[in-house]
Image (tube, rainbow, N blue to C red):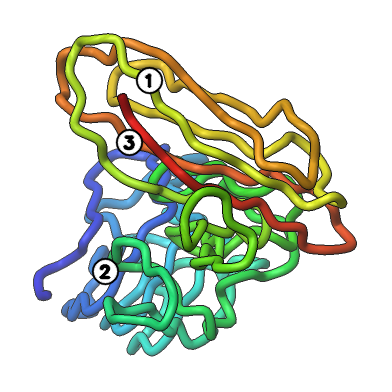
Amino acid sequence: MGGYSQVSTNNVSGITVKNCLHFMQVSTGSVGSGAMGNTAALPSTKHNYAYNNIIFGCGFGITGYASGDWVEDYNNFYSNTTDRGNTSVGAHSTAYPVLLDAPRLLAGFRFPFSLGELSKWSQLLRIAGTSESTDDFWGMTRPVTSSKKSWGPFQATGAVREVTTIHGGATSIKLPDAGQQFLMHVPASAVSTVFNIYCYREANYAGTNPSLIIRQPGVAETKVTDAGSAGAWNLLTATLTPSALPTYVDIFISSENTAAAGSYAAYFDDFSVT
């Protein structure tokens, strides 16, 4: 892409850009250009902020009109002509190869592809340490345990198809550790609807138990948390009447394992809507 910036501000401060993927922004290199920039200097006490972004393959990454216009931290810069202009290096920012995932057929279960997801070989998938951003591009909450947080736009869960720990069918969905996973869009209307899914958690799982989450734009989310015993399949069920608009709900499954000494899985199977 060409032009000045993917994110450009003019005489405005206090803007925070987080959880974004910026790439192939072939900018001119002038002040204010790049993946992010501003076209007029800000007062010395005013700043814009960039956190948890992946910026690669750009002419310029973050370019302030004047020094200090942008404060960046917890970002990953890679293969840009110039990473920063008039912008100080964030103490926690990195420069790892990105290694984005790609849509393809795998031997196991594959969830819908979203541009910006990291492959399982990416160094950015899990980086120990604090992350400024508590949620990701989809609004998914990042794990409480810092070493289990993913860098960048998408909180990775490593969800896979499981063929051994199953409930009623041949496969289940395994979340190997903390994180939320988008499951599917479900068409909905303003009638009473029952959502069911079975959940199984390993014995050493710690923290808030796994949950089923139902979200609809403009409506408070519904969250059903596993209240049964570990090491057994437990039914998570929610009965609700969705809003008439929009005509869908989003289904998420969530693991909130906080055990720092190990990774303990949660499994989900037999999702149904009636």
Question: 10 Å neighbourhood of mark 3: few (<14), some, or many (≥20)?
Answer: some
**Looking at the picture, how far across and down is residue 195, in whole percent?**
40, 26
Q: Earlier in the sequence, mark 2 or mark 3?
A: 2
Q: Are marks 2 and 3 in contact (CB under 8 Å)?
A: no
Q: Amino acid at mark 3?
A: Asp
- The residue singled out by tag 3 in the image is 250
Q: Residue at x 23, y 68 (%)?
A: 33
Q: Residue at x 63, y 28 (%)?
A: 225
- The residue singled out by tag 2 in the image is 31
Q: Amino acid at mark 1?
A: Val
**In the rendered image, is residue 175 in sight?**
yes
Q: Are marks 2 and 1 in contact (CB under 8 Å)?
A: no
Q: CA distance from mark 1 to mark 3?
A: 14 Å
Q: Between residues 180 and 38, which one lies in front from this camera angle?
A: 180
Q: Nearer the viewer, mark 2 or mark 3?
A: 3
Q: Nearer the viewer, mark 1 or mark 3?
A: 1
